Image: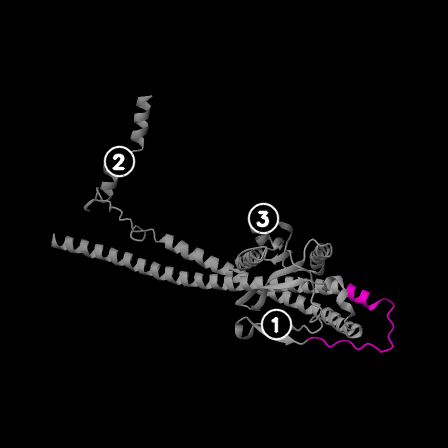
Amino acid sequence: MLAALAVLSNAFVPSIAPVSSLQASFAGNELITNTPVRPTSGNLVMDGKSNIIRDRIKTVNNTKKITSAMKLVAAAKVRRAQDAVLQTRPFSETLQKIFGALIKQLGREFLDLPLLQEREVNKVVLVCLSGDRGLCGSYNSYAIKRTEQRMAELKAAGVEVSLITVGKKISSYFNKRDTPVLRSYEMGQSPTGADATAISEELLADFLSGECDSVELIYTRFVSLIASTPAVRTMLPLKPRGIETEGDEIFEMTSEGGQFSVKREAVEAAEPAELPKDLIFEQDPVQILNAILPLYLNGQILRTLQESVASELAARMQAMQSATDNAKSLSKTLTSEYNRARQAAVTQELLEIVAGATAASES
């Protein structure tokens, strides 16, 4: 066995003796048999490993393409979210007109409606909105911080707080904490009326049954493509006055000059509908108003869902733009480093050649 191992080891040891046939073919020339090996210095470039930098440049450029594509995808989704908001405007305006007309007709009789009754606040339900995914900068963290801030304010006032979370990010965060989470919903990329109805029905049931005294909504208010602000809004009880005079804002994204921007347009409140003086209601106007208020609540929740999605997409656009700019800068830096390394390697080789030629001429 030892003899066999010795034979194998000898077979893998390279021979340094020159071959006679090779010497014969180079008759009259000097044959170098022992070439010294230059020790490695640890420098990636001087060791002939500059391909590492080149591969990194390629990786950074591929990342830049991905982030640029994600920015364009987010921009397309912002346009769809914008169209969804515009499609809900006619319904909201009609509802506001009818609401204003009924209030004018009833005077102060509508103040006894259950959804308008204010009571002593001992328990509050916070409906907090976030996104389902990351890669959108500080959008989700701002929503979480604003929720925790509002919870601390209410607890300091001796008010019991429970949560209803909308969005995977904020749901996963608070599910690991001690704060009770009553229900969790997914945000999605295109909220629908059915999504808003599912949330509003649960809120109405909790408020009318007395399980909570107030419902507050924490969402991200869309300001521009580079700014959004977490806001707190009281949803229940509804204010007796102000619904019929509440204005609105419409945001329209444009791409003038190759750059994305947002145009803001203020929309005044819809004028109350003119009801005939001899109009006879088949039902009590108070009952009609009591049926309209849940529709108004549903429309407001849908609007905040759509605005939160638009804010998330705008934040993702900005984050991907920053990532693209950083990748471009890093690629430029690495390219300069690679070129300097190549020049240093070529200069080193030229110096070695000149030094060898000088030594040969002197000898």
Which disc, if any, is residue 175? 3
Q: Is residue 289 magenta?
A: yes
Q: Nearer the viewer, residue 163 or 47?
A: 163
Task: Please say whether residue 77 is visible from this viewpoint.
Answer: no
Residue placed furthest toward the top:
1
Does dot 3 land on a helix, a strand or a loop?
A: loop
The picture places residue 363, in percent across and down from the top left corner, at 12, 52
Which disc, if any, is residue 233? none
The image quadrant that residue 222 belongs to is: bottom right
Q: Nearer the viewer, residue 189 or 345?
A: 189
Does dot 1 land on a helix, a strand or a loop?
A: strand
Which disc, if any, is residue 15? 2
Residue highlighted by disc 1: 252
Q: Earlier in the sequence, mark 3 or mark 1?
A: 3
From the viewer's perspective, is residue 348 above or below residue 1? below
The picture places residue 264, in percent across and down from the top left corner, at 60, 74
Q: CA distance from mark 3 to mark 2?
A: 70 Å
Q: Nearer the viewer, residue 129 or 189?
A: 129
